[in-house]
Image (spheres, grey):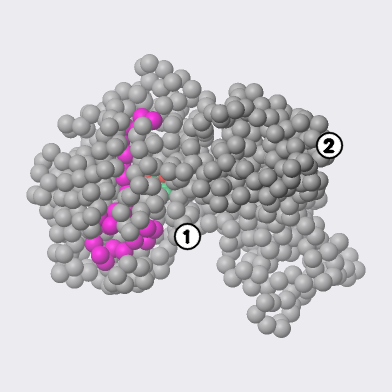
Amino acid sequence: MTNDPLLSPFQLRHLTLKNRIFLSAHEPAYAEDGLPKDRYRAYHVERARAGVALTMTAGSASVSRDSPPAFNNILAWKDEVVGWMKRLTDDCHAHGTAVMIQLTHLGRRTRWDRGDWLPVVSAGPAREVAHRAFPKTAEDWDIARIVADYADAAERMQAAGLDGIELEAYGHLLDQFWSPLTNALEPPWGGDLDDRMRLSMEVLRAIRDRVGPDFIVGIRHVADEALPGGIGAAEGLEIARRLKASGLVDFLNVIRGHIDTDAGLTDVIPVQGMKSAPHLDFAGGIRAATGLPTLHAARIPDLATARHAIAEGKLDMVGMTRAHLADPHLIAKLVAGAEDRIRPCVGANYCLDRIYQGGSAYCLHNPATGRELTMPHLVPKAAAPLKVVVVGAGPGGLEAARVAAERGHEVVLHEAANDPGGQVRLLARHPRRAEMMAVIDWRMAECTRLGVSFRFNSWAEPETVQAEAPDVAIVATGGLPPEPGLAEGDGLAVSAWDILSGAVRPGTNVLLWDDAGDHAGLQTAETLAASGARVEIVCRDRGLVPEVMAMSLTPAIRALQRADVVWTPTWRLDAIRRTGNALTARLGSDYGPETRERQVDQVVVNTGTHPLDDLYFGLRPGASNLGEVDYPALIEGRPQALNRNPEGRYRLFRIGDAVAARNVHAAIYDALRLVKDL
Ligand SMILES: Cc1cc2nc3c(=O)[nH]c(=O)nc-3n(C[C@H](O)[C@H](O)[C@H](O)COP(=O)(O)O)c2cc1C
Ligand code: SF4
C-alpha cells in the first residue's frame, strides 16, 4: 500500500523516524551481567533489519544501585553499559532504525533481596503488592543521589550514540512521588501537585543540563491511575500539561492504569480474550490536549488498528511490541504487500509472564525470538530435498511440516482428526482463548502456501508411514488424559477434556481435582462455573494453577471469583465412592495424615496427558537411528546423523507431547530446532 499512513515518516524534532511503528520499551530479560550483550543486540537488530522505525531498548534500565533488577534489567548505572549500547545502537542505525532507551528508578517496584541487598525506596511506606517489598521512605540524601544517577545514566546513553531516552513514570519511583496513594512525604517533596512533581522536574532539569537541548528526552507516564484516591484523568492531563510547559520533554508516551497488582498490570497490558486497543482513545485525548508528539502501546496487535490510530490522528507513533516478538518481520511483510503472512501475536502473554517468573521473554509460538543467535526467523533451504512424513497436526506437527517445507523438502502430514489443532483446538473452544487458533491457522496457511500434502481423517499406523517411503518420519501425535490413578473409583471420574469438549454435561455440585495446574484445568473450572455448577477446585500445589502465569491468570480469576468458585490448595484426591445418588470424594494431604470428605454429584479430574506413542514405538525398529536423538547435535545446531541400525530405511523422531506433556512453546521449539537442520 503506497499511501499507507503507517509508512509515512514522522519528524521528532531533528530526528526523522522512517515510519510510524515503534517497539515500546520491553525488558526481555536477555541482559548478561546487567549488560545488553550479543543476544540482546541480535534481538533488536533482527527487528531493525526488518524496518521498525524506533526501538526503545531495555525497559526499566536501572539508574541506581538501590533500584535492583526486578526482571534482569539493564543496569544503566554501570559504565560498561556504554560500549554494549554503542554496538547495539550502531548496528540498528545501520538499518535506519532510531534507538532510545527507557531509564528508570523502580522505587518500590522491585525487591530488596536482589542486586546489592539495599532497602527498596519510595515516596512513602506503602508496599507494592506485586513485588511485596516494604519500602523505606526517601530522605533528602536519597533524592539528591537519585537525581544525579538519572543524569549520569542519560549521559552514558548519549555517549553510546543513542538518539534519546524515555523516563518511566508509571508504577515506578517518579510517579510514586506523583500519586497521593504512594507519596506520604511533606513539602517540598509531597503535598500539592507541584511538590509531588518536584522530583520529576529536578530529574528532567538535571538530565537536560547534562545532555543539552539536542538529545531527545521523553517520558512514558501514567495519565490516569484508574484507582480510587490515585491520579485521576483530570490530574493526569494536568501532569501532561506541566510536562509540556516545562519545555524539558520532547514526547509523551501515554499509559492508563496501575501496575502495582497483577490484575492492574493486565488492564494496562491486556492479554488474549481482552479488548484490543483499550486506551487508544484516551491516549489520543492527551495528544489533542497537549499537542506534544504522542506515543502509545497497549494491545494494538494488528496493522489495521495501528493504521487507524495514525490515520485518525490519535497517535504519532504506534507501539506494536508483542506483535514484533511474534513476528520481527512485520514491517518488511507490510512493505512487501504480504500483510496476510504476518505471524500473529495471539496475546498468550507467555513472553511477559515469563520475565516475572525470573525467565527470559519467549514468544509462545515463535521460538526463534530471543534465540536469534541460534534459531532462524527465516529458515534456509536444505542442500538436498528429502521426503518428510509428519504425523499429527497439532502445533508441533504443523511447525515441523512448515519448517521442513521451508527447507525445500517434500512433506506429507497425516492427522487422525477431521481438522488440525490437537489440544489447541480443544482449548480454543473457550471464547477467552479463541485467539489460540491463530497458532494453528497461521501454520496451516504457511503449509498450504509451501505445498504440504495433508491427509486428514488418517489414523497412521506404522505401515501407513512406511508406505510413503520417507527419509524422515516425525511423530507429533500429542497425548491423551491418563486414568487418574486413584486408590479407588477411577471409573467414577470424568476428565477435564470431557467437560471442555462438551462430551459430558457439567454436574451441579462439582469437585475438580486439578493435578496438572494448567490451562486445561482452569478452563474446565470456568466452563463448569459458567454452566451454573457449584465448583470446588482441589489441588496438591500450594499456589494456584502453577503452569499459568500471573497476567494470564487475571481474566480467569475474575470469572471464577464472579462465580464464587472455591479453591482448596494443598489437598489431594485419593478416592471416589458412590454413596446413593451422590459421590463421596476422599481427600488426603502430602503434609500429614489428615483426610477430608466431600459429597458431590460429579468429580472432574485434570491430570495432564500421557504420550500417545504407539506409532513411534511401532516405527522404531525400521528406523536407522532407532528413534534416538543426538542431544549435543540438537543443542549445538548440527544435523542428526546417528546410525544405530544398518537396516533402517528412515530416520525417526518424535516431538511435543508425544514425548512428554509440556506446552505449545516446547512443542514448536522441538520442531524448529530439529527440522531446521534436516
Ligand atoms: C517482555 C516484556 C517486557 C516489558 N517490559 C516493560 C518495561 O520494562 N517498561 C515498560 O514501560 N513497558 C514494558 N513492557 C510493556 C510494553 O512496552 C508494552 O506497553 C506492552 O507490551 C503493550 O504493548 P503491545 O500490546 O504492543 O505489546 C513490556 C512488555 C513485554 C512483552
Ligand atoms: S507470547 Fe503470546 S503475547 Fe507474547 S508475543 Fe507471543 S503470541 Fe504475543
Seen in the image, is 639 located left or right of residue 584?
left
- Is any part of residue 172 visible from this angle? no
Q: Which residue is labeled 2 in the image?
A: 463
Badge 2 residue CB within 8 Å of ligand 2 = no
Q: Which mark is residue 297?
A: none
Seen in the image, is 192 located left or right of residue 538?
left
Query: Helix or strand or loop: what does disc 2 sit on?
Result: helix
Q: Residue at x 28, y 57 (%)?
A: 75
Quadrant occupied by the N terminus: top left
Quadrant occupied by the C terminus: top right
**In the depicted structure, whether residue 122 falls above or below residue 329:** below
Q: Residue at x 36, y 32 (%)?
A: 49
Q: Nearer the viewer, residue 23 or 381?
A: 381
Residue 127 sits in which quadrant?
bottom left
Q: In the rendered structure, which segment of residues is drawn in magenta?
A: 50-76
For marks 1 and 2 on the same chain, the one whose residue lies earlier in the sequence: 1
Q: Position of residue 158 (x, y in %)?
A: 17, 45
Seen in the image, is 333 located left or right of residue 150?
right
Q: Kindly identify the amino acid type of the residue bearing the numbered disc 1.
A: Gln
Number of residue marks:
2
Q: Kindly identify the amino acid type of the residue bearing the numbered disc 2.
A: Glu
Query: Helix or strand or loop: what does disc 1 sit on?
Result: loop
- Is any part of residue 494 visible from this angle? yes
Q: Nearer the viewer, residue 512 or 69?
A: 69
Q: Residues within 10 Å of mark 1 (few under 14, many from 20)?
A: few
Confirm whether the magenta stretch covers residue 70: yes
Seen in the image, is 596 located left or right of residue 110?
right
Q: Residues within 10 Å of mark 2 (few under 14, many from 20)?
A: few
Q: Which residue is labeled 1 in the image?
A: 357
Q: Nearer the viewer, residue 670 or 540?
A: 670
Q: Position of residue 437 (x, y in %)?
A: 62, 38
Q: Residue at x 23, y 44 (%)?
A: 86
